[in-house]
Image: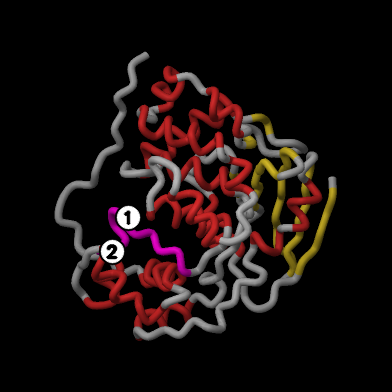
Amino acid sequence: MEERAWVPEGPLDVGQVLGPHQHGGGDPTWRRTPDGTIWRACRTPDGPGTLRIGVREGAVLGQAWGPGARWLLETMPALLAAGDDVSGFVAHHRVLGEAARRHPGRIRIGRSGRVMEALVPAILEQKVVGQEAWRAWRWLLHRYGTPAPGPAPEGLRVVPEPEVWRQIPAWDWHRAGAEAVRARTIATAAWHADKLETAATSAEADRLLRALPGIGVWTSAEVRQRAFGDPDAVSVGDFHLAKIVGYALTGEKTDDEGMLRLLEPYAGHRHRATMLVGLTGLRPPARGPRLAARDYRSF
């Protein structure tokens, strides 16, 4: 085991900053214990590792196990938004200014530095309800992931290596609930994993990602938010986001084009602005039943 203590500059909500890296309540790579401690399993450049993060008297305490332990501790501050510059952000809407004042530790954006672990669940989440995507993620991780190193909570799993994603047979994709299109997209991306993981900037990652079949603006943005901590990567194409942003800022729902117009004053921080929108709690009234998760599997 290796350990590290780190004191963040300014207020920091650890659970909120790490939250985007969790995919559903049963994510096998993630666990939060009743005392607020967060466990995270990750496949680092040095191999699998487990990171345990707790907070005591204003300091973040990290403990790590496995071949990737040192890498996880070295990058822990970045994961917890060290270097995320919020100084250029100005709230041009009163409702966002109020949200920023109420939640000063919750608008910071961390970066994991791991593209594939953000990309696979993002592809699974394409054009489906969250429950359907998270069910597939859980099934695939339990079947093809590896146990997290160290004294990790039972069931914590490390994401498979790229070659494993490439070799998953069609019938297991089906059993997971991921149809052929998403399976092909993940397998294709896995062939280019080395290049994706070594992208130096969010802009370079965007170019590489969107050159791959099946990966568009939304998927690229979701990955760059998590892997690069990009404060400007807007999830254009999200089923709900434009409606929520429009309603929160104007009282009326809008589409992607309208959302981008509303976010123009926040250039450089448009994703951060949408995070603040989420913290307002403002949502357009529901006008129909929620979409149900599909399950077309047969066993």
Labelled disc at residue 16:
none
Q: Residue furthest top?
A: 299
Tell whether position 210 is magenta: no
Q: Residue furthest right?
A: 2
Q: Secondary structure at mark 1?
A: loop
Q: Secondary structure at mark 2?
A: helix
Circles 2 and 1 in contact, beta carbons < 8 Å? yes
Nearer-the-camera pick, 274 or 282: 274
Quick check: 65 above or below 8? above
At 46% from the left edge and 69% from the top edge, which residue is drawn?
232
Tag 2 residue: 242
Nearer-the-camera pick, 54 or 230: 230
Tag 1 residue: 238
- Is residue 57 visible from the viewing direction of this image? no
- Image coordinates for residue 103, horizontal then vertical, percent: 50, 75
Q: Residue furthest left?
A: 287
Q: Amino acid at mark 1?
A: Asp
Quick check: 287 above or below 178? below
| Residue range of the region highlighted in magenta in the rendering | 232-243
Secondary structure predominantly adopted by residues drawn in magenta: loop
At 77% from the left edge and 55% from the top edge, which residue is drawn?
73
- Image coordinates for residue 225, horizontal then vertical, percent: 51, 59
Q: Amino acid at mark 2?
A: Ala
At 44% from the left edge and 32% from the top edge, which residue is drawn?
136
Measured in 3D between alpha carbons, the distance from the residue under mark 2 to the one under mark 1, in whole angstroms, is 7 Å
